[in-house]
Image (cartoon, helix red, strand yellow):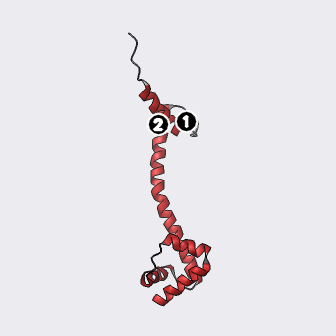
Amino acid sequence: MPRAKRGFKGRRRHKRVLKAASGFYGRRSTCFRRALDAVRHAMEHAYEGRKRKKRLMRRLWIVRLNAAARQHDLSYSRFIEGCGKAGIELDRKVLAEIAMHDQAAFGKVVEAVRAAL
């Protein structure tokens, strides 16, 4: 009687893991056991990285807004406070884009903020 082999499902799983590990260094890209461990770690880091990216982007927008607001003699915290009082419902991402690419429009936003403070 011939021996029982795993069939296509195991092969399909191995191929999927090895495809995900292509580009890894050494046996991590060719040996299934090493690749499986490497891919699992990589997926954990990617998951954490997606969360970290959101935090980093918000920090970047705040730094940019602080720099732009200080050019108009206003601190970041006062600027955000004034945005709330003036009813400006633009988020930090959009405000940072305006500050970078359209300084005249950002100046108008600062005028509205000053009027509200």
Number of residue marks: 2
Residue at image point 53% right, 87% down: 111
Whether 30 is drawn above or below 83: the answer is above
Say what secondary structure mark 1 lies in: helix
Mark 2 is on which residue type? Leu
Say what secondary structure mark 2 lies in: helix
Mark 1 is on which residue type? Ser
Q: Which mark is residue 42?
A: none
Residue at image point 58% right, 75% down: 99
Residue at image point 56% right, 71% down: 97
Q: Nearer the viewer, residue 69 or 34?
A: 69
The picture quadrant where one finds residue 64 is: bottom right
Whether 32 is drawn above or below 91: the answer is above
- Residue 62 shows up from this direction: no
Looking at the picture, how far across and down is residue 109, in whole percent? Answer: 53, 82
Give the residue furthest to the top.
Answer: 1
Q: Which mark is residue 29?
A: 1
Label 1 Cα crowd, 10 Å radius (few <14 / some 14-19 / many 20+): many
Residue labelled with disc 2: 36
The picture quadrant where one finds residue 6 is: top left
- Residue 26 shows up from this direction: yes
Q: Quadrant of the N terminus?
A: top left
| Residue 59 appears left or right of 1 | right
The picture quadrant where one finds residue 87 is: bottom left
The reply to whether the C-beta atoms of the residues labelled 1 and 2 are less than 8 Å apart is: no
